[in-house]
Amino acid sequence: MHQANTPIPHQQLCTVTLLGNLVAKPDIRYRTNPVSAVTEIILATSTKWLDKKSNQHKEWTSYHHIKVEGDLVEQALLTADKGDIILVQGYLSNMKPSNKELQSHAGIVHASYIQKFKKGYTQTVNQIYCTGQIASTPKLIKTQNNKNLAQVNITINQRVYAIDKQCWQNILIERELHAWGKQAEYIVEHALIGDSVMVEGKLSYLASANKAQFIDAKTLHCFKS
């Protein structure tokens, strides 16, 4: 894919909302200068759909790596345990998991809000709203089920507060975006590198060894630069 050289001129939107079950009890650590709590959790969300070929309902579980820092840890996670229901709002990050066995996994969500609920059954939530810019030439793929899939890279410019450094920072995120059906056809025919996009979708992960994170678009809007 041809990569974009066009600079991103302004801050862009990136909001992730997840509601799911905690996979394991949090391992909470404390760092100094300044003293603050930090932990990484894994949250499980599931997607259910009807397979028209077999006429059976199927389910796919996604596992989201989430970094939580500062007061959020002590407010919500000190008594958290495996199976608890966790609500997270945050943004995408370039960080890698601290666990060496997981460092090949691409894509952490950095929490800006978190709330814990008692164990129980709930419909999970997996949503992302973002704006960004097209960073590669879109490719159209025909899937095994004869559906149109477009794959394209987008960049998102975020302004976030770094708790460890106690300052605001701009971070540039690049993720692969998947669009389906008529949206796939449209973006392949009309989108150019540098064009702006607005996306509503969910976070998904490739079935490859590195579990690379991508954005699966439900609704996609494309605007000329």
Image (cartoon, grey):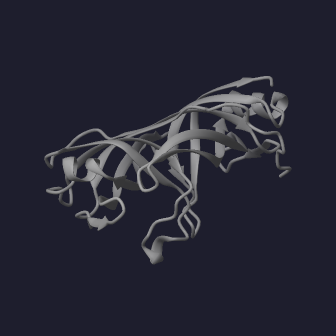
Q: Looking at the rendering, which quadrant does residue 98 occupy? A: bottom left
Relative image position of residue 56 (x, y in whole percent) = 40, 44
Q: Number of marks in the image? A: 0
Position above or below: 102 against 37: below
Relative image position of residue 18 (x, y in whole percent) = 37, 42
Name the residue: 69% across, 42% down: 154
Relative image position of residue 50 (x, y in whole percent) = 44, 39
Q: Is residue 166 left or right of residue 145?
A: left
Name the residue: 67% across, 32% down: 181
Name the residue: 47% across, 71% down: 102
Q: Is residue 37 left or right of residue 137?
A: left
Depth check: give the residue in front, 205 or 32.
32
Residue furthest to the front:
33
Depth check: give the residue in front, 161 or 145.
161
Q: Is residue 19 left or right of residue 181?
A: left
Residue furthest to the bottom:
101
Position above or below: 82 against 189: below
- Classify the position of the C terminus by image quarter: top right
Relative image position of residue 96 (x, y in whole percent) = 51, 64
Position above or below: 200 against 94: above
Q: Is residue 190 left or right of residue 34?
A: right
Name the residue: 53% across, 56% down: 107
